[in-house]
Amino acid sequence: MTTRRMDLNCDMGEGFGHWSYGDAPDEELMEIISSANVATGFHAGDPMTMDRVAALAAEHDVGLGAHPAYRDMQGFGRRAINATSEELVADILYQVGALEMFARRHGIALSHIKPHGALYMTAAKDRDLSEKLVDALQVVAPDTPLYCMGVSETWQVTQAKGHPARREFYADREYDATGAIVFARKVPAFDPAALADKCVRACVEGKVRCTEGHDVDVAFESICFHSDTPGAARIGAAIRAALEAEGIEVTRAA
């Protein structure tokens, strides 16, 4: 599946007030990535942080994406909450709307929407939630892509309903035999060069080694790494350098 263009996105803006959960400053990460997934207040983030990161995205010409989550600041959005699809969609739209105002303040538009953490994984398996979310987005943001896993109900629903979507490949997460990521509440330190090699192989061969020890097929338009992964800036820089050395341009997903 060798590609010559690849989006590189990062979950960021994940602080609150004087506290920051990220391993690297958002300002440093903006030099590396093409798209930013910005916390919108429910798992992390506050108005000042959203405003600051929106300004950075405008300055660096980085795509600004909303990263809505479960209402779970204590668990950093990595714990599932028992709520109806209607409640969760309302929470998502509330969060997306918050970041959209800051985007408009800085003269840019939201480039994408990407659920965070446990909410992302719930939507990946929950057809009803994915359908209700896509139905709502087709009313309020019909041209705004939804980021998701390729092997997910979310991807299937976007394709069935004709809503723009971008599949992700996760640099700093493991894959299982189905081609889905292995959800983790905490992650270890990684070798940046090894993750970069993993990403280049996925781009060139369309394959990744799963936890069961064999290769699985992957298809995607964007590569994700997390700002709270230890060594995040080194990881992002290594991935970008390796992609460019392979002749792959790092740019927003088309």
Image (cartoon, rainbow, N blue to C red):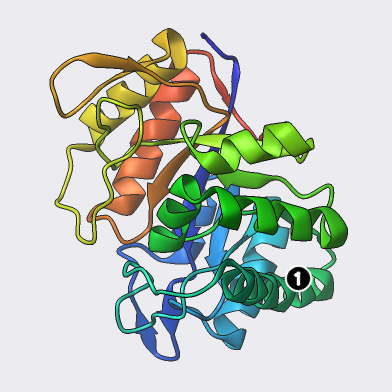
Q: Which residue is mark 1?
A: 100
Front in this rendered view, residue 64 or 92: 92
Relative image position of residue 79 (x, y in whole percent): 31, 70
Number of numbered discs visible in the structure rendering: 1
Q: Is residue 88 left or right of residue 61?
A: left
Relative image position of residue 243 (x, y in whole percent): 45, 23
Q: Is residue 136 visible?
A: yes
201 above or below 164?
above
Q: Is residue 112 visible?
A: no
Q: Is residue 212 left or right of residue 102?
A: left
Q: Residue visible at 58% across and 66% down?
A: 85
Relative image position of residue 104 (x, y in whole percent): 83, 71
21 above or below 124?
below
Front in this rendered view, residue 96 or 46: 96
214 above or below 125?
above
Q: Residue visible at 40% across and 90% down?
A: 18
Q: Is residue 239 left or right of residue 48?
A: left
Front in this rendered view, residue 130 or 49: 130
SS at circle 1: helix
Q: Within the image, what quadrant is residue 75 found in?
A: bottom left
Q: Work out which quarter of the rendered image holds the C terminus and state it.
A: top right
Crowd class of label 1 (few under 14; some 14 to 19; many from 20; radius 10 Å):
many
104 above or below 59?
below
- Residue type highlighted by circle 1: Glu
Relative image position of residue 129 (x, y in whole percent): 58, 57
Q: Residue visible at 26% across and 43% down?
A: 182
